Image (cartoon, rainbow, N blue to C red):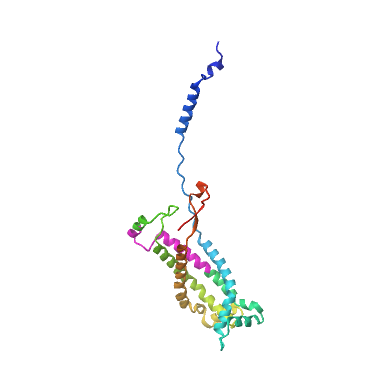
Amino acid sequence: RPSRCDCALPPLGGGGGAMRDRTHADASTSRPTPPPRSPPPAAANPSIAVDMACGAVAGVAYTVSAHPFDTIKVAMQTRPTHPPRSALEVTAEICRGPRGALGLFRGLAAPLVGYSIEAGINYAAFNQGRRWLERNDPFVAAAGAAASTTAAPQDVVGERRRPVTRHLAECAASGALGGSLLSLVVSPTDLIKCRIQDGQFRRARDAVADVVTKHGVFGMTRGVAATLAREVPGNALFFTVYEAAQMAFPRWVAHPHAATTGGDQSQNQSQ
């Protein structure tokens, strides 16, 4: 009587190998192809709070480092002598005063607060304004925008490049917006700072009280028109030249296929 084991065993020879080959071939042909790898999601745009915080920190660093030179400038402008003194002579005179070298930081409180707020407003307005302009594209008509988008080349990540002139126009408009907003902070800050630096007052609180007593609350806005005339075109030109210089110089950027190939060519020159 044949055993159960003999009935269950496959026949020996080439038949079993052929069956195994057919099984592997069917499995390989029926294996689903992996979907195409999608590009990594774009990073979210920073919020206006992040832009303001970063600008404020930068404004504090700038104010602390630049205030001694501003004190020397104001002293040379408000107390002229004949013959005029050099910057080194004015510096030595201030350092020989009762406060010593700390006299160079006289009147620091007002610009430390004002300029940090000004820098935060400036960079937040510029970044948020530029992002809004890039999304809404108000500088071109709908037909012109469609034509330019169709003809625009593709960059390394698949996004369409914007025309250079339109990009610089957006930077100029965003810079002008930042300049108009920061003027409302810079003008009263400069008013108080200069009154302290030229020796009229020792504290910012006393200078503010004097201005409000003599000219009312709107006395703090003296010089806003001149500040606007300086900051709006100056800020627009600053950011436009900055962006143009960034585009003019070559950049090293990460190659999009570096992560998939694993090669040593992880960086390629973008221009």
Residue 165 horizontal/vertical position (percent): 39, 64
Residue 33 position (above or below residue 137): above
Which residue is at the front of the view, 72 or 231?
72
Residue drawn where x is 45% and y is 68% of the image = 241
Q: Quadrant of the C terminus?
A: bottom left
Q: Is residue 131 magenta?
A: yes
Q: Main secondary structure of the magenta part?
A: helix
Any part of residue 130 in sight = yes
Left or right of 59? Residue 131 is left
Q: Residue furthest front?
A: 264
Chain part drawn in magenta: 119-145
- In the picture as drawn, the residue positioned furthest to the top comes out as 1
Residue 164 or residue 197, whichever sits in front = 164
As drawn, is 82 to the left or to the right of 228?
A: right
Residue 246 percent location from the top left of the image: 47, 63
Q: Is residue 248 above or below residue 262?
A: below
Which of the 4 image quarters holds residue 54? bottom right
Residue at image location 32% in from the left, 58% down from the top: 143
